[in-house]
Image (cartoon, helix red, strand yellow):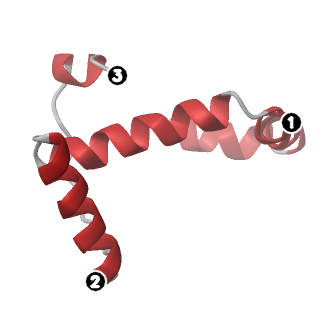
Amino acid sequence: MVSWYQDITPKNFTVRLRDEEAANAEALARAEGVSLNETVRRALAEAVERRRADPAFKARVRRIIKEDPELLERLAR
């Protein structure tokens, strides 16, 4: 799990889930004995790590960086 988020100001946002997704998230949180918020944070951290380990994803990101550096610079401001 990523622990750096505790060192910065938390960001709030809304996630819209279908009923089944929400029920699964709530069940997972209860089964793991953590909050729903923590369950979502963990799931996001795990998804990011999976993408970072995926060579095809990394290739797409490199292609985007190469093809459109101006867009990325604009977003980085």
The answer to whether the residue labelled 2 contacts the one labelled 1, judged by CB atoms less than 8 Å apart, is no
Q: Closer to the observer: label 2 or label 1? A: 2
Up/down of 31 relative to 46, above or below = below
* Foreground pick, 32 / 18: 32
Q: Position of residue 55 (x, y in %)?
A: 82, 32
Horizontal relation, residue 10 to residue 73: left or right = left
Mark 3, Cα crowd under 10 Å, few <14 / some 14-19 / many 20+, is few
Q: Which residue is drawn at 12% across and 52% down?
A: 30
The image quadrant of residue 7 is top left
Q: Position of residue 75 (x, y in %)?
A: 56, 43
**Which residue bears the numbered disc 3?**
2
State how far apart marks 2 and 1 are (Cα). Answer: 34 Å
Task: Inspect this view and state whether residue 36 appears.
Answer: no
Horizontal relation, residue 77 to residue 60: left or right = left
**Which residue bears the numbered disc 1?**
59
Q: What residue type is labelled 1?
A: Ala
Q: Which residue is drawn at 18% across and 62% down?
A: 26
Horizontal relation, residue 65 to residue 46: left or right = right
**Which residue bears the numbered disc 2?**
19
Mark 2 secondary-structure assignment = helix
Mark 2 or mark 1, earlier in chain:
2
Mark 1 secondary-structure assignment = helix
Mark 3 or mark 2, earlier in chain:
3
Mark 3 secondary-structure assignment = loop
* Foreground pick, 62 / 69: 62
